[in-house]
Amino acid sequence: MIPPLKPKDSAQKARLWMEELRCNQLPVVENEKFLGLITEDIILEANDEEKPVSEFELIGKNCFVYSGSHFYDVIKLASDHNVHMVGVLNEEGNYAGVITVQDTITSFAQSAAVQIPGGILVLSMNQINYSLAEISRLVEENNAKILSSSVKEDELDPAKLKVTLKINRLDLTHIVATLERFGYKIIARFQETKVLDEEKGKIDMLLKYLDI
């Protein structure tokens, strides 16, 4: 829904569109080819709104994905280029539109991995020992499933990884015990309090029913 600018458009037009659309970046397109993004900061630094967009140094010239790309690719590109939106090209390499980081986050929030209730575990391990298949096997032994996983390098030790797991169980007690039995180090766990709150609520209702 964000219209592209043409190289011949003025910086003033770009600024007006940014104000109207409440954004500070806009795509620039010529003959269906994505040229990059122009930002409000670039225009303000030039201090000449009569200049055409073609005379500005655009950013994010290679900041684009293809229409079948995963939203992880969008987030990574946006982060790498420090932009708020990413160009989208069709199979022929022609401009199809842009997707914003906010759109991507919304899409992620609507995914099953986020919507399905569950608990989250964060594991720390040496990179050489990482095997998602092995971790998944141990989780499934407890009649649970890994809904999503993410892996990143430990900021304090490049030889180690932090593995974040979303599991379709709120009570992670047995899963944690199994993982620890096999030598996995759990450094964080979340959402277990919901289980305790639910159980406490059931007990309170029972005591009230029994008038104790």
Image (tube, rainbow, N blue to C red):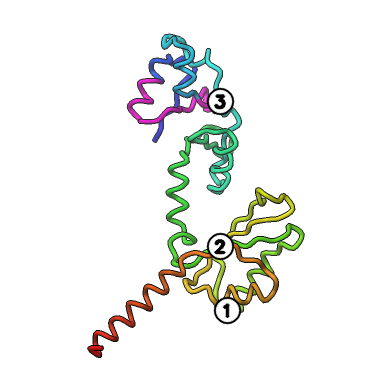
Residue 194 x/y as whole percent: 41, 69
* Lateral position of residue 182 relative to residue 203, left or right: right
Looking at the picture, does residue 179 appear above or below residue 44?
below
Q: Tell me, yes or no, whether the highlighted magenta stretch contains residue 19.
A: yes
Find disc 1 in the rendering and name its residue: 142
Judged by depth in the image, the label closer to the viewer, 2 or 1, is 2
Helix, strand or loop at mark 3: loop
Name the residue that disc number 2 marks.
Answer: 188
Q: Secondary structure at mark 1?
A: loop
Bounds of the magenta segment: 15-37
> What is the three-letter code of the residue carrying label 3?
Ile
The earlier-in-sequence mark between 2 and 3 is 3
Report the amino acid beneath label 1: Asn
Neighbourhood count class around disc 3 (C-alpha, 10 Å): few under 14, some 14–19, many 20 upward: some
Residue extending furthest toward the right: 128
Q: Quadrant of the N terminus?
A: top left
Q: Are marks 3 and 1 in contact (CB under 8 Å)?
A: no
Please provide percent x and percent y for residue 189: 53, 65
Q: Looking at the picture, how far across and down is residue 43, in whole percent?
A: 46, 17
